[in-house]
Amino acid sequence: MLVAAAAVAASVLPLDRPGLGWLVVALVATGALVTVAVTAPTHADDRPDGTGVPGPVVRVGWALATIALVSVGVFRAAEWLFLLCLLAALITATLAVTGGRSLLGMLVAGLLPPVAVFRALPWARGGLRTLRTAGGGNLVRILISVGVTVGLLVLFGLLFAAADAIFADLVGAVLPEVSVPGVVTWVLRFLLVGGALLAGAHLLAGPPDLAGLRAPGARPVGRLEWALPLVLLDLLFTGFVLVQLTVLFGGAEHVLTTAGLTYAEYARGGFWQLLAVSLLTLLVLAGAGRWAPRSTRADRVLFRVLLGALTLLSLVVVASALYRMQVYTDAYGATRLRLLVATVELALGVVFLLVGVAVLRLRAGWLPPFVVGTAVLALLGLALVDPDRAIAERNVDRYARTGALDTVYLSRLSLDAVPALDRLPEPARSCTLRFLVDNRYPGEDLWTTNLGRARARKVFATNPVRTTGLSCPLFDGRPTGP
């Protein structure tokens, strides 16, 4: 089963672009590993994890998340987005195979697959030896049957292809090109995917015990030692929040008269600092949760009040950062980086809400998987928004209001942005799209099918782009940095 899955993956995987082949590989690999999990003699793990849901259900959730992340390559042409989704899919696939639940268990789980590749080789060799000993005759007959089947399919497929040109085109779109470089690439992909599947099968057949893997408990500190820093930090956060409320209601006039800055400059100058504050606050909350005592009722009440207040105030900081980014984007236009960090801030807001629940419950064992799940949902949400197209839409609308347009930056977006950029009047439209026309991938086939690229090709076919006689400004004079 693993060999067949690796062969299919090596035949359909388009390494140079997002496409349908990636989703096919994810589905085939999932099917092969599920077969191993069902048939391998493993010890069932029906102990509930921190969420109260049986472990197998959580693994199924991670597997579905992996498939959803990889499926982004079918709908979005943005390679940067698909790369982020692939990296996240590696994490969720690892969690689906290993079943790590605690923070330490999840970190250890990330180190297991590379080691499992080498440990799986003698395991697989032993399994083949056992299979050959138990039913060598059956194995030989199966191999002969597979050889005969392949031979018949090739023979009749060639005859049908010679008899009908449409069928020949269909076969050519499905089957990979046979050449020496193509064969070498196929072998490399087979080894890469086969090694990953073998490691996953080995971990499923002999699952590591990560369920109870937790960091050793820390010695609680005195009440004054942990409460004093948090009280002062809460007061500092409160002062900042009051200032933010003043700015929110005072608007641009208040900023101009008080700080001597334009509203956009004020927003740009503070967003990155507020993002750093949000991340550092999570570390403070984690440290307080580890070392603050909770043995008495007074300790528990103080813990909930101080950490709960810091969590609520942090939500206001997140809202302030998002508002600043909104103002800054309205003034200077949308970019990938601005959209990405705004998504990170939104995800941090959800994490702070989860931390608030953990503070009230005085239990955080369930938190790590939910934090990873939040990151996955944020990435899937970003893909659902279609970021490059959303950026183009925002900048086209800004151009209609202000006449400012950075055609150089917009021309560096992916083909997902083409339908939005098609709204621009000439010559701005052709000045932007003439670069994207050259970015279309040659040699599209069934396994490289992608909705974003298909939409772009339709736009180019319906309304061709001018490439001569254009006078294109390179830059509108507005800041396009982070």
Image: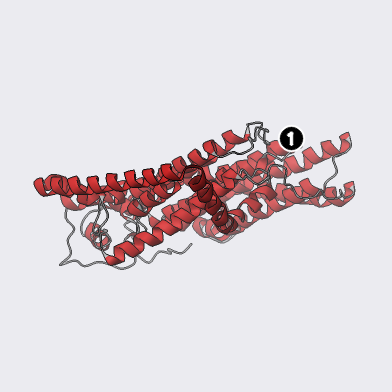
Residue 473 left/right relative to 227: left
Name which residue lies at 84% across and 47% down. 227
Image quarter in which the N terminus is found? top left
State the residue position of label 1: 360
Dot 1 lies on which element? helix
Residue 239 location, x and y as percent? 71, 49
Q: Report if residue 319 is visible in the image.
A: no
Amino acid found under the numbered disc labelled 1? Leu
Pointer 1 local density, CA inside 10 Å: few below 14, some 14–19, many at least 20: some
Residue 475 placement: quadrant: bottom left
Question: Residue drawn 63% across and 57% down?
Answer: 276
The residue closer to the viewer here, 291 or 116, is 116
Q: Residue 402: x, y in percent?
A: 34, 55
Q: Is residue 399 left or right of residue 160?
A: right
Percent from the top left, x then y, of residue 154? Answer: 22, 49
In the rendered structure, the answer to whether residue 214 lies left or right of residue 372 reads right
Q: Nearer the viewer, residue 185 or 409?
A: 185
Viewer-proximal residue, 202 or 73?
A: 202
- Residue 434 lies, with reference to residue 228, above or below; the image says below
Rendering colour mode: secondary structure
- Residue 55 visible in the shown view: yes
The number of callouts visible is 1
Q: Position of residue 70 (x, y in %)?
A: 43, 47
Q: Residue 344 vs residue 222: left or right?
A: left
Q: Is residue 8 above or below residue 56?
A: below
